[in-house]
Amino acid sequence: MTDTGRADLHSSVLDQLGLLITSGDLPAGEVLRIEQLESRFGVSRSVIRETIRVLESMGMVASRRRVGITVAPGASWNVFDPRIITWRLDGKGRDEQLRSLSELRRGMEPVAAGLAARRATPEQCGELTGAVMDMAVHGRSGDLEAYLNADIRFHRTLLEASGNEMLSALSDVVAAVLTGRTHHHLMPANPEPSAIRWHADVAQAVQAGDAAAAERAMRDIVEEATAAMLGEQPSAEG
């Protein structure tokens, strides 16, 4: 088997096992046997061992002498890992995951926008504006994948422009929720013009150094996204 084929096989088994754990089909406390996993997925022991090592690094399983490999409780998981987010969005816990992510975004993205208004470089301001222009073009054409890429670029740039390395480190988390929103058909075929306008407002406020306006427009973005994904009414704050 080629290295590429082996990597694809490992990735496939990892996704299947990860989804089984996050969905609760393999509940906390369940003991996993290497030989049973080999038979279940039809792969070699080395592929299973590689997969278990990755899951262990994510806090999803624990290996203990004389016990074996045990599924860990959700409190032990690295819930910021984009792969765990993706599995939870693909499974039974989608609504709970979306709610958690939306609450996280409400708490940190407006703050990041305010910081970006104070710290963004001219290059970052240009990148924000360019991303908004691409969102507008792809929103009108209905190319949701291209729109998603531009949207991710906008939010990743904004978090980096905050100048706070911990906020910037959350860019993959935001990218995961934006991707999940698109791939699970939780956005309209043609993105809301108001959402694109609010992105433009953030970019303009960041460039103007207006922290309050940047925070306000970012809060509008997050509120609209939350309402669209969870079927809630946007708050009066938005």
Image (cartoon, helix red, strand yellow):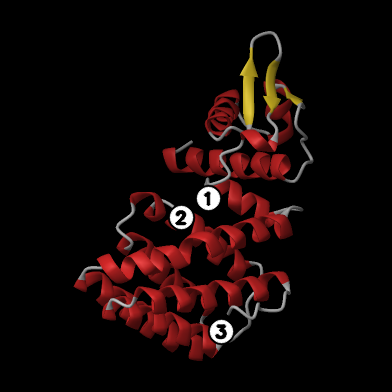
Residues packed near mark 2 inside 10 Å, few (<14), some (14 to 19) or many (20 plus): some
The residue located at (74%, 46%) in the rendering is 23
Amino acid type, callout 3: Pro
The residue located at (33%, 61%) in the rendering is 162
Q: Nearer the viewer, residue 21 or 214?
A: 214
Q: Distance between the residues labelled 2 and 3?
A: 22 Å
Rendered image: mark on residue 172: 2
Residue that numbered label 3 is attached to: 191
Q: Which of marks 2 and 1 is nearer the N terminus?
A: 1
Amino acid type, callout 2: Asp
- The single residue placed furthest to the left in the displayed view is 122
Q: Is mark 3 on a helix, strand or loop?
A: loop
Residue that numbered label 1 is attached to: 82
Q: Where is residue 35 in the image (x, y as percent from the top left)?
A: 70, 21
Q: What element carries label 2?
A: helix
- Label 2 with label 1: CB-CB less than 8 Å: yes
The answer to whether residue 155 shows anywhere in this view is yes
